[in-house]
Structure formats: structure tokens, C-alpha cells
Amino acid sequence: MKFWQKTYLCVLLVFLIAFDIGAYALLQKSYQLNEQMDMSRGVSEYESIDNSLSYILQVFANSTGSTAYELVISGFADNYFAEGVLMEVYEGERLVFSNAYQFESAREELQGEQRETVYRKLDGELWIFVGGSMEFNGLKLVISRSSAYLQDYYNTLISYFITLSVVISVVLSAVLILLLFRLTAPIRNLNKGVRDIAAGAYHQRVKISGSDEIAELAGDFNKMVDAVSTNIETMQKANEDKETFINNLTHELKTPITAIKGYSEFLNHANSTEEDRRMAIDYIHEHVARLDLLSGKLMELLYLKNEEITLQPVEVEALFAYVEQMEQYALQAKQITLVKECGAERIYGDPVLLQTLFMNLVENSIKASPDGSTIHLKSRFRDPHVVIEVSDYGKGIPDKDIEKITEAFYVVDKSRSKELGGIGLGLSICSQIARLHHAQLWIESKEHEYTKVSVHFTASLQLEL
């Protein structure tokens, strides 16, 4: 059973119970008031008859001295019989006169001296009996008349009550259904959105206006879906990166392994000359060195992903000097000039990792630069960051490759990379080192003109320089 149906039944049931109880209590109160009025009327009639009959009997007894009251009472009773009032007169236990119905049952109105009023049903019709001691000679008088109108009134009230209850139930049911169907429309929209999203439509969002609890729930649900979608996209991206990484790693391993296998088989050839064997050994050595480089870079990359570092002061001038010293042979081999500018004298970080970062950047610039060119390595303040830049005027990077160039094993020119000994892990390592230093890596480039890689150090310690 749906929520609106449960609400409908509960509200309808509670309202009808409350209404029926209240209406029935009102009905009973109305009937009681009419009953009291009927009893008051009966008492008034009794007192009037008692006074009149007592007076007539007293006059009759005084004038005749006779106790034969039947004829006098009979003549008196005839006057009230036409009005529907019946009379009984008792002397002790003896019935003196009666034009009323006779029945065998307890007669409470004849018990004691006080006046009593009793309702009875005779042949399905309601009658009122009023009895008590008369003022004359201890006689007892009972008058009775039909109160069928009171019974009819009660039956009419019951009929009205039932009719009104049915009408109100129908009207209330219709109003409740329309009202609840309208009020629960946001819940149905939310439910539909949940089903759609559960079916995989993560781009959809629940649209519910207003500021009530349901709207708040819809807003929280949309936030949850945003978080789930982000996590799913992250997981998908991680899986894609992982698959790409494995594919690239497999490819990188396959080439040297195939070469080593081939040259090792060549060495086993009996007819090979000493020169051929030396050539094969050189190629095997070259590919083993490549595998050694690859394994070292991979270990370094895995280490950086799980490492936490402690920031400490690092002198920029000493850092630049170390980088220049380590890349001296590569610079001299291509007659490239490294120009250093230290606008910012100190940064905070891990000295060894910072050396690796800028050695990789300078090494990439050397590979991309033509012979006899210039590479700039400089530090400066760019409020509120400290920035270190490595720029060259070499082959540049196409726009389509800039966003992907920090991914592991990604290389812009695969043929050129093989020639220069690159394996596509340098900038990936640089990106990880920058992340550990709370820094941002920015790459600006124009193909065949220049490339500038900037490292923006944003940690709060850098701002204290």
C-alpha cells in the first residue's frame, strides 16, 4: 500500500470516528433534552389532573358522604381521554378506576409516596407513565400517554446522522484523495527520479520546487547523486588510467624483451662473427639499461603516490646549481646554454624531490631544444605564490597533448621519444612531486616555438618568505 493511500485511510478513519462520536453525543444530548421536556410536560399534566381531581372528589365526599368515586372519576377521565391522556386511580392495592392499558410488570410509579416518571414500550410504542400519591384521601393516581413522537424524533435523528455520516464520508474521501494526490506529487517525482537513477541515468536530477521537507530531501538526494556520480566517474577514470598504464607498460616492456630475446638467440648462432656478437651484446646492454631505467622510474612513481613529505627550507640558488651540474654533460653535448635567475631566494620542500623535479624538467627541455639554443631556469614571486619556471625554444607541444602529457607513459612523438630514450614517465613524476609540495604544475606551449613549465608553490609556508 502506497504512502498516500495509508495517509488517506488513517485520516479518513480518524475523522469519521471523531465525527461519529461527536455527532452521536450531540444526538444523545438532543434526545435527552427532548425527553426532559416531555417528562416536564407529563409532570405538569399530572399536577393539573391531581389538583383538579382531588378538588372534585373532596367536594363530592363532603356533599354526599359517599366513597363511590368511580362514576365521578370516570366522567372526569373522559375529558382527558380525548386528549390522549389515560388515568388509573388506586386505593391501596385496589384498582378504583382505569381507562389505561393493563399489563403485568413492575410498576415503579406506584412504589412509595414520591412522584415517579417511567417510560415503557407497549406494542412497540413508547409511553410515559407518571404516578404518585394524590392530595385526596391517600389515593394514588397514574396518568399515561403516548410519547411516540419522541421515538419518531430519535429515529429521525438516527436517520439524519447516518445520512450525514455517509455524505461527509464521500465528500471527505474525494477531497482527501485530491489533496493527498497533489501533496504527494513531489514524493512520486522523487521516487521516479530514484528509479531512473537506480537504472543508471546518473545525469538526471530530481526537480522539486518549494522549501518543505520533501524539497530538502530532494536537494539532499541530488547532492548524494552528484557525489555518487563523481565517485563513479573517478573510478571509471581510474580504471581507464589503470588499463592505459598496464597497456603502455606492457608495450614498453615488450620491445626491449623482444630485442633481448632475439639478440640472445643470435649469439647462439654458430656462424656469427666477433663483430656481430659485439654488436648483439651492445644492443642487449642498451635494452637492459632501458629496462633498468623503466623499473627505476616506476618504483619512483609508486613511491611518490604513497609518500608524505616534510617541508623544509631549500635555497633556490643551490638547487639551480645542482640541476645545472647534473645536466652538464647533456647541455654540453648539444651546446645549450642554461640561464639561471633567482628572483625568489628560498622555497619550502623536500630537497631531493625538488632536485628530481627540476632535473626532469630541464632534461625534457634539453631533449626538445635544438643545438646551440638557450634554456631559462628562473624563480620569482607572483603574488601570492612562489613560481619556478623552466622554458625552452624547442619543438613545443601540440594543444591536444598538453592535458594528457602528465599521464604515465604518454609521449607526444613516440618515434622521437625512442630516439631520445624517453619512456613517458618524467612529467608524471614531476606532477606527483608537485602534488606532494602542494604546488600546481602549469604547462604553456606553442608547437615549433616554445614550451614553458611553471611550478606554483601554494603552501602557506611559501607565503612567509
Image (tube, rainbow, N blue to C red):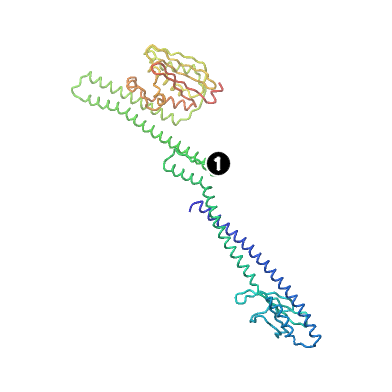
Instruction: Say above or below: 383 vs 211.
Output: above
Q: What is the three-letter code of the residue carrying label 1?
A: Gly
Among the 4 quarters of the image, the one containing residue 24: bottom right
The residue nearer to you, when weighing 130 against 370, is: 130
Instruction: Say above or below: 220 vs 440.
Output: below
The residue nearer to you, when weighing 281 against 11, is: 11
Percent of width and height locating residue 387: 50, 20
Instruction: Say above or below: 287 vs 138.
Output: above
The residue nearer to you, when weighing 191 against 47, is: 47
Callout 1 environment at 10 Å: few (<14), some (14 to 19), or many (20+)?
few
- State the residue position of label 1: 210
Among the 4 quarters of the image, the one containing residue 460: top right
Quadrant where the image shows the C terminus:
top right
Percent of width and height locating residue 327: 40, 17
Q: Tell me the element at label 1.
A: loop
Percent of width and height locating residue 262: 24, 26
Residue at x 62%, y 77% (from the top left corner): 122
Return the residue found at the far left.
271
